[in-house]
Amino acid sequence: MTESAFERLDDVVHQRTRLGVLTILAEVKSASFTYLRDELDLSDGNLSRHLRVLEDGGLVSITKSFKGRTPLTTVKRSEEHTSELQSRPHISYAVFCLKKK
């Protein structure tokens, strides 16, 4: 028996917030935690949890550093998965919609 399209959905990617993060990262190589939080209108804790799932799935890497005395968290898309993500039609469409905002 063949899998339906619904069964082939990747839970890591196809959750709305994580898809939003990946959509933004499909356009830029990296983004700050605060930029993602503000763009997606999320709480710090909510975004942290979703980023952890994406990091565990190998889709993003997270770097923590300081800019002066201010903590800076940067989220970068995984180079390994970049072409795969950009080839997914729903992410391309989501990027198109984001650009029209």
Image: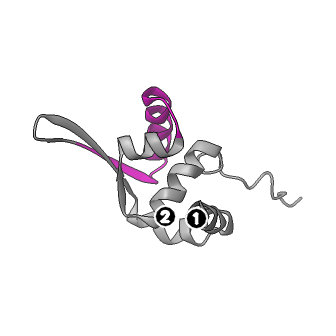
How many numbered discs, if any? 2
Corner quadrant of residue 29:
bottom left
Residue sitting at 66 percent across and 67 percent down? 93
Give percent across and percent down for residue 68. Answer: 10, 40
Which amino acid, by three-letter code, is at mark 2?
Ala
Let me know if residue 96 is in the magenta part: no
SS class, disc 2 = helix
Horizontal side of residue 90 vs 71, given as left or right: right
Residue underneath mark 2:
26
Q: Specify the farthest residue to the front.
A: 101
Query: Please, which residue is most extreme toward the left here?
Result: 68
In primary-sequence order, the first of circles 1 and 2 is 2
| Residue position marked by numbered label 1 in the rendering | 95
**Residue at x 67%, y 69% (from the top left corner):** 89
Task: Classify residue 77 by image quadrant.
Answer: bottom left
Q: Residue at x 61, y 63 (%)?
A: 91
Residue 74 location (% of width, % of height): 30, 48
Q: Nearer the viewer, mark 1 or mark 2?
A: 1
What is the span of residues highlighted in magenta in the rendered image?
41-64
Please identify the quarter of the rendering in which residue 71 is found.
Answer: top left
Query: Label 1 is placed on what type of residue?
Result: Val
Q: Specify how the rendered protein is coloured.
A: one colour
